[in-house]
Amino acid sequence: MAIFNMFRLWIFVISCTWLIHGLSSQKIDKTDTIVYAKSSLLRTLLKDYDKRILPQFNTSVPVNLSIGIRLINLVELFEHEEILESSIYMQLMWTDFRLTWNPPDYKLIHVIHVPVEELWQPDVALYNNADIRVEAMNTLALVFSTGQVYYAPRARIRTMCQIDMTRFPFDQQQCSIKFGSFTYDGHRMELSMFQENSTIDMAEYQTNNEWEITSTSATIVTKRFSCCPEPYQHIRFHLKLKRNTVYYTHVFILPAVILAFIVPFQFLLPPDSKERLTIGSALLLGIILLISMIQTFLPEAHPTLPYIVQYYCVTMVWIALSLILSIWVINIQNKGPSKNKVPGYIRQLFLKTFKSLVCVTDDNYYPLENSETLSLRSLEKLSTTTSNDSARNDGDKIERDIEDIMKNVNTILMYNIKRDSHACVKTEWYQVALVLDRMMCFIFGLIFVVYTCVLLL
């Protein structure tokens, strides 16, 4: 049994050795592989191929170059520098008659990948480029058996875009990307749209948080220059952008409206309150801070002033004016007997006409009519008269004491009358200041509503 098993093992080893020897003795025909076919095709196509020569079959037929853009994302729109930075795939297609072949001769190969550095490339330039060079990632070109060449490099471009900030942050911007040949005129290279509907390919677009693309379009522009009679073409791709206003509304509009809304209410403080000056100064500093913040968004040489900046400026003027009027009101209510009493026309106008219109209550106030403001001179005059009368009757000591008592009583009485007169005059001026405050509160409130609706709505 052991001899039988050993025999079977020897037969198995001999069979495996024979099989391996048979397989190794077979030769692989490399000429029958797809790799050899592609290598042979490349050698054939690039033999005597000069990539420096424009693939123009004859002078009467220009090379047709199709240009398109596949937008990946909008990196950022720099309003201050007026530059749009975006990431795109350039879509270029042209026909090179030197790169044609018969697919049945090369294993039915209809398309082949070729390094673009080995082929003729159109000198496509970004006309409105904001930088010296364009950052592009070179890829392989697709060459079809018909001679068509498709090349789609990815590029990050920065283009100039004229910004209109008049309605910031509710603005819409229109930017363009211009591509064209730098040296070939229209008789040698004719431009056409890669997309049939003359627009930008948005299939791979990544949404931008700040800007929304509302529409895209593309047009072919032909220009003639005074130096050259030949026409020169370029394709202009248009982007219409709409700003997302949520962030800017909370940062720039809402604080400004609140600051302007507070201005009329500072006139509701008592006329003798000094805190109104502190509030006005704080409001003025706040609006100046907002103006300095918005300067980082505005272009350096903007032809028009945005409505929101106009709103800031009007609010700043109104805050400054409210400070001046507050100082004037405080000065009015501090007037007293040392100054003249309230003139009759002011008393009639403010304390009788406007007082009821602005809803100022009486508060048990009785205005002075034609009574004079008493002074120390009238008191001295009365005291002297009393002294002369008492001098005639100085015979009796009791009478003199009574006269002294009466003299003191008269002095106290005149002092109280003088004090009450001072208080009445001061109260009149205080009432005038209070009416002025209430009038300015209504006026400033009305103007706030008007210029807010005009500039922001």
Image (tube, grey):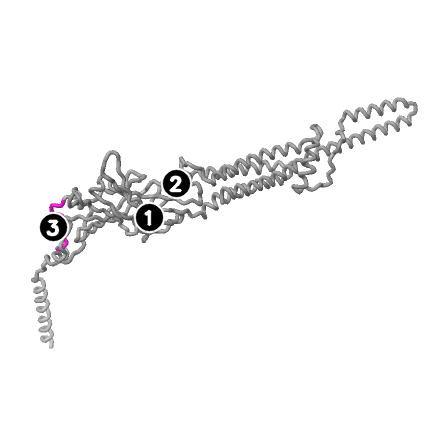
Question: Would you name the residue on which mark 2 appears?
Answer: 163
Q: Is residue 418 left or right of residue 97?
A: right
User: Magenta segment: does it hold 185?
Assistant: no
Q: Residue at x 76, y 31 (%)?
A: 371
Badge 1 element = strand
How busy is the neighbourhood of tag 3: few (under 14 within 10 Å), some, or many (20 plus)? few
Viewer-proximal residue among 154 and 240: 240
Task: Give the answer, above or below, for where 415 lies relative to 259.
Answer: above
**Alpha-carbon neighbours of circle 1 within 10 Å: few (<14), some, or many (≥20)?**
some
Residue 153 showing in the rendered view: no
Where disc 2 sits, the SS reads loop
| Numbered mark located on residue 217 in the image | 1
Task: Evaluate if marks 1 and 3 touch, with contact meaning CB atoms under 8 Å apart.
Answer: no
Q: Which residues are magenta?
A: 37-49
Q: Amino acid at mark 2?
A: Ile
Depicted 380 relative to depicted 230: above or below: above
The tag earlier along the polypeptide, 3 or 2, is 3
